[in-house]
Amino acid sequence: MADWNPALYTRFEDERTRPAADLLARVPLDRPTLAFDLGCGPGNSTALIAARYPDAEIVGLDTSPTMLHSARARLPHLRFAFADAASWEPERAPDLIYANAVLQWLPDHHSLLPRLFGLLALGGVLAVQMPDNLSEPSHRVMREIAAYGPWAATIGDPAVAGRLGRILEPAAYYDLLAPLAEEVDVWRTAYHHRMADAAAIVSWVSATGLRPFIDPLDEAQRAGFLSAYEAAIDAAYPPRADGSRLLAFPRVFIVARRAR
């Protein structure tokens, strides 16, 4: 995919940061000395960690140069580095590995989550939040539109582009980590974000989930795809009592602590 767009991503920063704050609020650590923010993006989640743990060494990691540049400009007193969560290994064991809205992009969670958990120091915490919205109209419509029209051959298999099969059921994450952990907390929450109109919903997903579908397209194909997608979104999310739309956004949360 093309590099991420921090400006587009942060257009809905309050909404995107709310689950990051909810995840951090459940982390059972008082004074971690070393924390990593995997997939830190523009630094909005890293800022939360720094505010809660001002004495900790905090490192933000991402694979996007533009996101890292944005994060460094926002938090110049913290360290940010290029790293892929799929293969990353720290030089020393951290007390907190915090992964907000990043692991859904990676495959093989049966291996990935236990591997990350095993990198923790004794008593350390793995905290994960992932969108679980692939069955929502916003993402179902992406796959339906990708399957027809002049862009279908360019996009390829909509299931692959849409990352189907990567997210496990919440109970499966519990079963993966419970034999390894002192305690595991798993929950699923659906947020309902107020959007001004269908175009706002398209703008939201254009920064994240829609990217695998539209990034490979040329300008004409992209315009055609987005026009068809917005029309479908307009029908899938009807106006509410005040004229706005509600974007339902389920997310899975996992907090697991290593034995001390």
Image: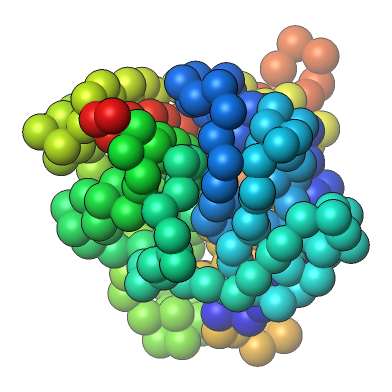
Residue placed most toward the observer, 59 or 216: 59
User: Quick check: can you spot residue 194?
Assistant: yes
Residue under the point 61% across and 44% down: 233
In this picture, is 109 found above or below 152? Answer: above
Specify whether 78 is left or right of 119. Answer: right
Give the image location of residue 98, x and y in percent: 50, 43
Residue under the point 65% across and 41% down: 56
Report the quarter where the C terminus lies. top left
Residue placed most toward the observer, 260 or 39: 260
- Quadrant of residue 88 in the image? bottom left
In this picture, is 250 found above or below 63? Answer: above
Report the quarter where the N terminus lies. bottom right
Residue placed most toward the observer, 214 or 260: 260
Specify whether 11 is left or right of 61. Answer: right
In this picture, is 205 found above or below 128? Answer: below
Residue placed most toward the observer, 198 or 162: 162
Residue under the point 75% across and 11% down: 241
